[in-house]
Amino acid sequence: MLWHAAPMMKIACIGGGPAGLYFAISMKLKDPAHEIEIFERNAPGVTFGWGVVFSDLTVDNITRNDPASAKTITDEFAHWDDIDVHIRGETVTSGGHGFIGISRKRLLAILQDRARELGVTLHFNAECDPADPKWRDYDLVIASDGANSRFRDANPAAFGVDVDVRRNRFVWLGTSKVFDAFTFAFEETEHGWIWAHAYRFAPDCSTFIVECSEETWRSFGFDRMSQDESIAACEQLFASYLDGHRLQSNASHLIGSAAWLNFRRIKCERWASGNVILLGDAAHTAHFSIGSGTKLALEDAIKLAEVLNRDGLSLEAALDEYQAERNLEVLKLQNSARNSTEWFETLGRYLRFEPLQFAYSLLTRSQRISHENLRLRDREWLEGVERWFWKRATDGRSNTTAPPMFAPLKLREMTVENRITVSPMAMYSAVDGVPNDFHLVHLGERALGGAGLVFTEMTCVSPEGRISPGCTGLWNAEQAAAWTRIVDFVHAQSKAKICLQLGHSGGKGSTRLGWEGNDVPLDEGNWPVMAASDVPWTPANQVPRAMTRADMDAVRDQFVAAVRMAIECGFDMVELHAAHGYLLSSFITPLQNNRTDDYGGSLENRLRYPLEVFAAMRAAWPGDRPMSVRISATDWAGEDGVTPDEAVAIGEAFAREGADLIDVSAGQTWAEQQPVYGRMFQTPFSDKIRNEGRLATMAVGNIYEPDHANSILAAGRADLVALARPHLIDPMWTLRAAAQLDYRGVHVPPQYLNGMSQLARNLKREAEAAAALRV
Ligand SMILES: Cc1cc2nc3c(=O)[nH]c(=O)nc-3n(C[C@H](O)[C@H](O)[C@H](O)COP(=O)(O)OP(=O)(O)OC[C@H]3O[C@@H](n4cnc5c(N)ncnc54)[C@H](O)[C@@H]3O)c2cc1C
Ligand SMILES: Cc1cc2nc3c(=O)[nH]c(=O)nc-3n(C[C@H](O)[C@H](O)[C@H](O)COP(=O)(O)O)c2cc1C
């Protein structure tokens, strides 16, 4: 049936939460002729929860939509600026966060009054049953019945409902203790860690959400306690923050509410079916720790009312636009909310951090707040973090206040000047494996560009170990001499250190130059390839020979021979490439390895040969120079491939053999991979390996702004940050970042000093002009 957005509609809103009420208000404002009824199962004034927080942007939106209700709401806002993080007896306070909040009860009362004033009919104590035939009498039934929506769940297939029940337990309580700052209080107990998120929303009242892991929750016996007992236990646990004030619940007398909950992340593929339209939490939820559920509900309501009243728009088109536009916003927030949820679920990783870094990690957990955002909020606090970072990076010698990316890092006896790395990138420009003038200029230019560490491309240990005929190699004296020339240039003309990445292409070898077709076999002159098993990369690629033990010995010895030559060339560091589906990676991933001997099956077996190669290389490489290994931390294949949990074990295994750094890449290990791309998309794997395995890591993958690098480093998500593609078009990336951040300590080649100071001046002028415009 083709409906048209009619001038007058008869509408039922199921649920009198923020979504239902605000939609009714917004519809009436658009056209008072609409007949709107709200059905709320609870009595007036009875609701779950305590306070809700808003952002300035939401305030702007509701002010534009309905200045009258917005004024009443904003007049009653509680404002606060600081966040206090309490952990291990210390309090870390940062300012400038600018929160506004209101009691949920007051918000609903204001919206109810406004709805009545505009002629909306409100029914309380009215439990609605989706099976009731009376809903057919309405043009539209708005399912604004919250996260546990009966109207959505009556027909889950129609809406394509996806529910993700999260791991932690939480209970939403209130207290008369007034918290001046948004407070996070972490307490260690014999049962595990438990923490509170607390904030003031009225002059005499605060929200107090208590959260812990499922294991801690059970160990406390919360699963066996009555609500009153749970509350009493929480009062005791957080007594030092409550100053004698009591905790209270308002969930017990509510229909459909429980005390302790697991957060349910809800997504729906379709937001409308028949005459039922999902709104607010019924359509989507965002974890309470980013405080955006009410904002989303209000903004859904504004948008839905707008499209339904737009002239000339069919109902179908209106609903399509409603979902398309709102879903984009929801997905962005759900993404941030997922990061935040996972931070609390993996809290154990960060508890060893010093309180200052712990607080930084907490503040940047959703990745919506970055290093420079924090500088804008509280410069002094951020500079304290930077000083702390530099002190640690220099064993207490430096008192510098400067961006973390410029702090040095020591690996064995090698010290890199700063934390920015030029990631290995195959250039497909060598002849017979010999690097030439292109490589000299390419690598030399990037070293002059200020990066602390420059990686060579994957340099192959034998002619058959090359990916393409254009790959560099290190198996003969001519190649060694050519590399020496490059290494000498880097050392003489820059402060950069240079790392040789050594690899063997395995089953992905004998293919064309990158720009002539990635992983596509050569038209002619193919050479035979070998791998862990006889599994071809794709049906178009050669079937590799499954390596015999003799092959393994030969290839291991080739790696060792290359390492010996690398010493002569003067390389500062060597990396073993065990990622991306090449030879050693083909052992590690179960998707390429179907061996039934000691080198296949369990992770221990699959790692055996790569570890043997690494150990042999380590034995040949000087003890005072560092070595790293590049791994794919996931096969992007779910449980069928290498998982991030296994990646921690892989990192640990290489570290036991003497790896000083795990270079954390991902994927490219099987042709059917399903990667999830995005800004800094592989950094979570680095975070996991670094903080669960307690290993030094390098993060890589769509990191392109200085702000990304600084946020990653200060939050302890990696020790080094590698950039590949950004360096292809901007060899001077690090110098440009130094100019942008007005950091004077970076080494600038003397030939370029004039350019650097001019860039810094111009950028400063532009920033000042932009700031003046904002004022
Ligand atoms: C612990 C916690 C903390 C939160 N903190 C914040 C925060 O700080 N800021 C923020 O913006 N959001 C926060 N939220 C989220 C916020 O509460 C929701 O996102 C928001 O309330 C969504 O509004 P809604 O109208 O869609 O749903 P709800 O507010 O859940 O309203 C749904 C209404 O429908 C009624 N109802 C349900 N079923 C029926 C039925 N069958 N018949 C009749 N009535 C029915 C319910 O009684 C309820 O009144 C938090 C949520 C939780 C769980
Ligand atoms: C042209 C090109 C060649 C690459 N060659 C290599 C390589 O030789 N060895 C390697 O480990 N990774 C290689 N990579 C992967 C990069 O090192 C890096 O992990 C990836 O590009 C993601 O980082 P980015 O988003 O900063 O580009 C290559 C990437 C590009 C773009």
Image: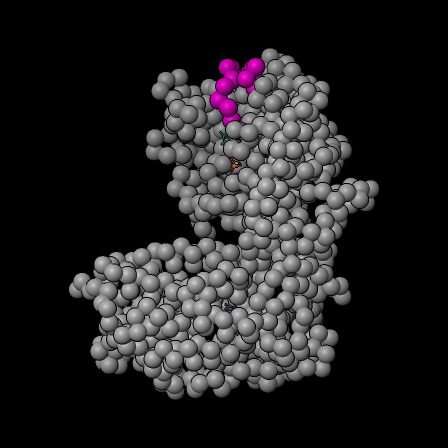
Magenta part of the chain: 425-439
Q: Toward the viewer: 398 or 735?
A: 735
Residue 119: which quarter of the image? Answer: bottom left
Please give the name of the residue rendered at 42% of the width and 68% of the height, measured from the top-left corner.
66
Query: Is residue 464 rendered magenta in the image?
Result: no
Residue 224 vertical position relative to residue 675 in the rendered view, above or below: below
Does residue 693 appear in this view?
A: no
- Residue 31, given in percent of the width and then of the height, sits at 30, 70
Residue 59, compared with residue 735, is above or below; it is below
At horizontal 67% and vertical 72% (from top left) the residue drawn is 179
Q: Which colour scheme is used?
A: one colour
The one of 463 and 430 positioned closer to us in this rendering: 430
Q: Which residue lies furthest to the top in this view?
A: 478
| 134 vs 361: above or below | below
Residue 440 in which image quadrant: top right
428 relative position to 237: left or right: left
